[in-house]
Amino acid sequence: MNFVYIVKCSDETLYTGWTTDVTRRINEHNSGIGSKYTRSRYPVELVYLEEHASKTEAMQREYSIKRLTRAEKLELIKQFNS
C-alpha cells in the first residue's frame, strides 16, 4: 500500500509526503535523514494519514494536499482526528 501523510514539525509547520512504510518514514524524519525540509525541524509528529492503492494515486493526492493553504490542511487534519 501507499500512504500520504502530514507531519507537524517542531516549529509548528506542516510537511506532506508519501511513502510505502509510514513507520520507517517517520523514523527517517526524526533521525534527520528524511526530507531536506524536516532535517532542521525534527522531531516531527504524524497528524494525518491516507491509504492509496497505487503509487500514482498517492503522488497525485500528495500534490493536491501540498497545494492547499495551511488553514485547509489544518481542517483536513481536524476531520481526520475527529
Image (cartoon, rainbow, N blue to C red):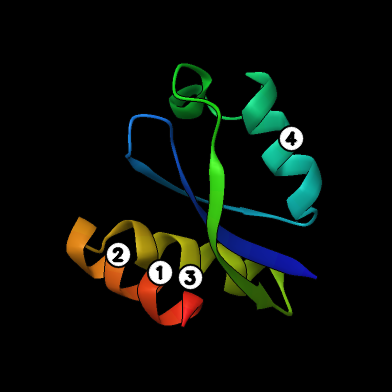
Disc tally is: 4
Residue 74's label in the rendered image is 2
- SS at badge 2: helix
Which amino acid, by three-letter code, is at mark 2? Leu
- Quarter-of-image position of residue 35: top right
Residue 54 location (% of width, % of height): 72, 74
Q: Is residue 26 above or below residue 42?
A: below
In this rendering, the answer to whether 56 lies above or below 45 is below
From this view, report whether residue 72 is shown above or below residue 21.
below
Q: Secondary structure at mark 1?
A: helix
Question: First in sequence: mark 4 or mark 2?
Answer: 4
Q: Which residue is mark 1?
A: 77
Residue on which the image places disc 4: 27
Q: Residue furthest front?
A: 82
Q: Earlier in the sequence, mark 4 or mark 1?
A: 4
Q: Which residue is mark 3?
A: 61
Q: Are marks 2 and 1 in contact (CB under 8 Å)?
A: yes
- Reading the chain from its start, which is encountered first: label 4 or label 3? 4
Q: CA distance from mark 2 to mark 3?
A: 16 Å
- The amino acid beneath tag 3 is Arg
Measure the C-alpha gap from mark 4 to mark 1. 20 Å
